[in-house]
Amino acid sequence: MRKTKFAAIAAGALLFAGILGWVNLSNLPVEAKTSTGAQIDTFTIMSTAKNLPTEKFQDFSLVFCGE
């Protein structure tokens, strides 16, 4: 009984501390600053790419088992 009561109090204190920490951290202001000076044009990068490595596969789609 004594150990059970201590475990219940310890679990409650841990739960309370976790909730209190979560509430305090969720109230912090979120500051997200983005730089608008340098932007990456992904379409240009993809359309002007040259000499990219290619991968070759063997086509086994028409291989039939002999019965």
Image (cartoon, helix red, strand yellow):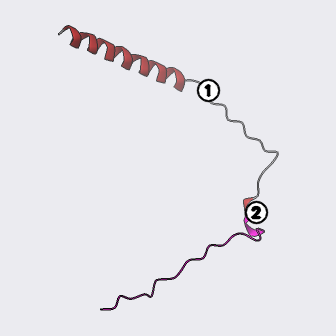
Q: Is residue 48 left or right of residue 3?
A: right
**N-terminal label among 2 and 1:** 1
Rendered location of residue 36, percent (x, y): 78, 44
Q: Which residue is mark 1?
A: 29
Q: Residues within 10 Å of mark 2 (few under 14, many from 20)?
A: few
The quadrant holding residue 13 is: top left
Vertical placement of residue 27 versus 49, above or below: above
- The residue sitting at 76% across, 54% down in the picture is 40
Which stretch did the figure color magenta? Answer: 46-67
Q: Which residue is mark 2?
A: 45
Find residue 10 and name its label. none
Rendered location of residue 34, percent (x, y): 73, 40
Which quarter shows the C terminus? bottom left
The three-letter amino acid code for the residue at tag 1 is Pro
Q: Is residue 8 left or right of residue 26?
A: left
Vertical placement of residue 38 versus 53, above or below: above
Vertical placement of residue 66 versus 43, above or below: below
Vertical placement of residue 33 versus 1, above or below: below
Front-lying residue, 30 or 66: 66
The quadrant holding residue 53 is: bottom right
Magenta highlight on residue 64: yes
Q: Residue furthest front?
A: 66
Under circle 1, the secondary element is loop
